Image: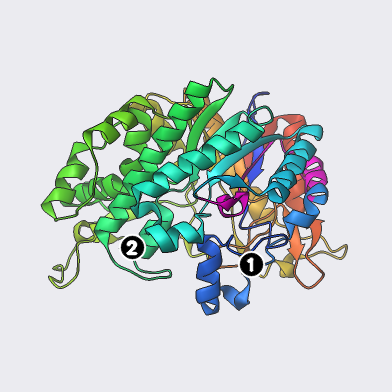
Amino acid sequence: MSQKSITIPQDFILGAASSAWQTEGWSGKKEGQDSYMDIWYKNDRHVWHEGYGPAVATDLYNRYREEVALMKQAGLTHYRTSINWSRFFTDYEKGVVDEEYARYYDNFIDEMLAAGIEPMICLEHYELPAYLFENYGGWASKKVVELFALYAEKVFERYHHKVSRWFTFNEPIVVQTRVYLDALRWPYEQNTSTWMQWNHHKNLATAKVVKLFREKGYTGSVGAILNPEVTYPRSSAPHDVKAAEIYDLFYNRVFLDPMVHGRYPQALVALLEQHGVQWDYSADELALIRDNTVDELGINLYYPHRVKAPSRAWNPQTPFHPAYYYEPFELPGRRMNKSRGWEIYPRIIYDMAMRIKNDYRNIPWFIAESGMGIENEGQFRNAEGVIQDDYRIGFISEHLYQTLLAREAGANCQGYMLWAFTDNVSPMNAFKNRYGLIEIDLQNNRARRAKKSAGWYRALRETRTLTLNIDDDWK
């Protein structure tokens, strides 16, 4: 065990993130402005922990000034959130802006800028309008791609002079994987072809928005927030290595390659064809993706993914799923966040950084989410009422250290953003596991209280030095 200190460069982002649907609540929301998350909650509330969902969330819509003051207190340089597509319009087909909601964002963004906090805005963080899901099948439809481009055009027109860093999607693979691949979320349909169609149309939509932004001559950049899983094979044996490579194809490279290199991996296209996965695409669409790659990436990383070659035959009655080629593997003796059921392995950040450096043209990127969710955090409250979340400080320290090491090794990494700024609602998990620098007290009108980690994060920005104790073997 030794103590290590590392300098945080002055231009390095120290921020935090959240989303519209997880914070705003439904205040001011009009009839017909439900998002996919809203209708899932309305149709399936019993699967959300203790019934909490997006209806109130953290009530940010009414409390954004208080929130920004806390951001400044915690020393954030940047804050990433989304604009809720389902609320930004009153007519999705014609692109009629809801002026009341748009003014809320005018004011929220202005408040951040006045506090010296740079806003980073995502256009879609699971907030696909329910109208488009119910009438067009969501991202299965090319019509929705066109309507998303219309939405982006209207958002850019309104906010381009205030916001310079834009992102098309947060974790674009998640919704269709949970709904159409694993059938774990409403409306529970296992359809691998629909899954791939959603993937393609989100890649296509990203390319269209990048093209639009550049043609308009706006200042700034357009990227995407991806959640690639750093995947390790159980062993160096060829069958385990192949399992990890195929997992990587389906869950990571399906977005990394087209967004950064402008093309799908040929091995992925061949496997989809081999297994009869049907998805509609054209040469013109592939050319658009080729010619309009993103400017930067946000990368969400929480835990490693470990796989091994499958040890059982695939049921011929079951539609094709990428799990045909792999099984999960649990590393004996692994460190765990037992509240979340996730392995803790900070090295994932360094390994992903080297992969982006070596395989993805060292594109500019940053850690867009990294954090630790803990259940029953009230047990760590001191006599003054402050949650002593040293476990969170330790988690951030180890992961930030790996980020800074990677930057020193030549990775084009621009910063580290914590998930999340405040405790907030997560899909199904609701408020069960808390992630924030700021506590949300559900028993006291969602009152905000800074945790110990908030003061520590502020000091990190002021000193620009990270110091921690680490195992020499762990580096």
User: Could one spot residue 362 in this view of the protein?
Assistant: yes
- For the point 47% across and 44% down, which residue is it? 148
Q: Nearer the viewer, mark 1 or mark 2?
A: 2
Q: Nearer the viewer, residue 249 or 217?
A: 217
User: Going by the picture, which residue comes out furthest to the front?
Assistant: 94
Q: Nearer the viewer, residue 237 or 62?
A: 62
Give the residues drawn in magenta, as a range.
67-92
User: Going by the picture, which residue comes out furthest to the bottom?
Assistant: 46
Question: Which residue is identified by label 1?
Answer: 431
User: Going by the picture, which residue comes out furthest to the right?
Assistant: 384
Residue 448 in percent (x, y) is at 80, 58
Q: Are marks 1 and 2 in contact (CB under 8 Å)?
A: no
Residue 407 in percent (x, y) is at 52, 27
At numbered mark 2, what does the secondary structure look like: helix, strand or loop?
Answer: helix
Residue 186 in percent (x, y) is at 43, 70
Q: For the N terminus, which image quadrant? A: top right
